[in-house]
Image (cartoon, coloured by chain):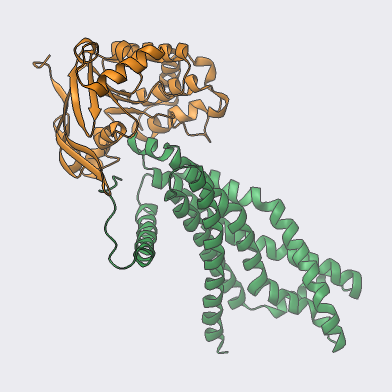
Amino acid sequence: MAEGSGDRKPLLSKKIDKFFTGLADAWNFVRRFFQEVFMPPYEFKEVIHQCYRIGVESLPLISLTGFIVGIVFTNQSRPSLSEFGAASWLPSLISIAVVRAMGPLVTALIAAGKVGSSIGAEIGSMKVTEQIDAMEVSATNPFKFLVVSRVLATTLMIPLLVMYTDFVALMGSFLSVNANEKVSMTTFFVQVFEAITFLDIISSVLKSVLFGFTIGVVGCYKGYNSSKGTEGVGRAANAAVVMAMFLIFIEELLVLQIVNAIRGI
Amino acid sequence: MESREKVVEIRNLEKSFGDLDVLKGVDLDLFREENLVVLGKSGSGKSVLIKIMVGLLKQDSGSMKVFGQEVAKLGKKELNELRLKIGFSFQNSALYDSMTVKENMEFPLVRNEKNLSRKEINMRIEELLDSVGLPQTINQMPSELSGGQKKRIGVARTLILKPEIMLYDEPTAGLDPITCRDINSLILEVRERYKTSSIVITHDLACAKQTGDRMAVLLDGQFKAVGTFEEVFPEATDERIKSFYDYNFINS
C-alpha cells in the first residue's frame, strides 16, 4: 500500500517513539495476517511449497539435533539417577523432559535460526530489489503470497517437526538406555508413555503452534520492513533470528506458568 | 498535440520525505500513444513521480489523475483495476528471483485473468517472449540472464496484462551502448505494437532522443522545460539543462 508523507516529529524521544511505532506496526502486521488469511484468493500452491521448504528441508538438521539431544541428555542424567539407584527411571525422566520442554524448544530454536533467517533474508532482499513493489503494481497481493503463505507454513510445520524431534530424541535416548541398562524397546516406550499425560501432549502441540507462528511472523515482519540496501537484508535476517528466539523463550515461560496453573502446581 | 486524449494529468503535485522537498508543484500531461521522457539528475524525484502514479507512494498535495481517476482517492479494488492498465518496468527489472522466466510471466496473469486455460497462458507467454526476442529463456532463472535480457523479460512481464500505459524506470541504466540501443528499439516497438502511452524515466539523453516524442526536464522539484528534444536541448538557456546536454553528448 501507499506510503504516506515523510517522517513525523517524535512525540517523546526518538528511541521511545520508535519503540512504540514499531510495536504498533508489528501489531498491524499481525492483524493484517488474520484479516487476509481467511479471505480469498488462497495461495494453496505457495503454502504447500513453503511447507515443503520449512518441513522437509529441515528434517536432516532436526534429526541430527534431536538424536544428539536424546543421547546427551540420557548420558548426563544417568550418573545422578544411578547414585540414588533410580536408573530405571531414565525413560520417564527423558520423556517428560523431551515432550514438555526440550523437543519444542530445541526444534523452535533451530527453526528460528534456519527458517526465520531465511524468511527474513528472502523477503528482505525482495523488498530492496523492488520485487514486492513489482507484485503490488501488477495488481497482485504480495502480503498474501509472501507473508500469509509462510506464516501458515511455519505454523503448520513446526508442530509436526516437534513431534518428529520428540520421536528422534526418544530413539536416541533408547539407544543409550538399551546399550547401558539392556532395556528392551517395549519396556522403554511403555515407561515413556506412562510418564506423560494428555496435558503434556496438548500443551506441547499448542506451544509448538505458537512457536511456529512466532517464527513465521517475525521473519516476515523483519523482511517486509527491511530498509534499503544489502545491509538492510542482513539486518533483517539477523533481527528475525534474535527476536524470534527471544519471543520463544518468553512464550515458553508463559505457557509453563499456564500449564502449571492447570496442573495446580 | 493538445487536442489528443490525456491519459495522465498531473497538477501542482508535491511530495516531501522528511525535510527534503522532492516534488514542488509539478504539472504534466501524458497523451494517448505518446512517449514522454522525464529527465533529471539522480534523486530529482523522477521515480517518485511514477510511483505516485501507480499508488506505491502518496503525494502530500496536488492532483494525479490517470484515465481521469484521482489515484490517491481510489480504494484498494479500484486501484488494482487501474494498475492492470499500467505496466511498470523497474530499474533493476525486479524479476522474482526464485521463479523461472515462465513463472515470472505467469505470476500476474494467473492471478488477474482466472478464466484463461493453460494453453492460452502458455501461448501468451510464448508470444511475448518472441516479441522481446528471448523465447529460449523460458525455463531459465533470472540469475542466468544478462542485464539486457532481464530488462527485456521485465518489459515482457509487464506487457502480459496488456497495459495501456507503460512506465519505464531507467530502462538503460547499467547497460552497454549496444544493449541500450536494443532496449530503446524495444520501447518504440512496444508502443507501435501494443499502442501504449509511455513515460520513460532516464538521465540518458541518447535514450531520450531515440524514444521520446516529448522531453520533460525535472530540476529542483519542478519541470523546467517541456517540449520536443530540439525545443528543449540544443538551444537550452538554462545552464543546468545545457550542461546536462553537453555532458551526455560529449561523452557519447
Where residue B165 sits: x, y (%)?
A: 26, 24
* Corner quadrant of residue A156: bottom right
Report the chain shown in green.
A
Q: Nearer the viewer, residue B199 or A30?
A: B199
Q: Does residue A265 show up?
A: yes
Looking at the image, residue B200 sits to the left or right of residue A187; the answer is left
Residue A6 higher or lower than B129, as above or below: below
* B235 up-or-down from A79: above or below: above
Query: Where does the N terminus of chain A fall, quadrant-wise?
Result: top left
Rendered residue at 64%/74% (across/down): A100
Q: Which of the 4 image quarters holds residue A161?
A: bottom right
Quarter occupied by the C terminus of chain A: bottom right
Q: Residue furthest left?
A: B3
The answer to whether residue B193 shows anywhere in this view is: no
Display colour for chain B:
orange
- Residue at x 45%, y 45% (from the top left corner): A146
- Please tell me which residue is depicted at 69% across the width and 57% down the height of the picture: A62
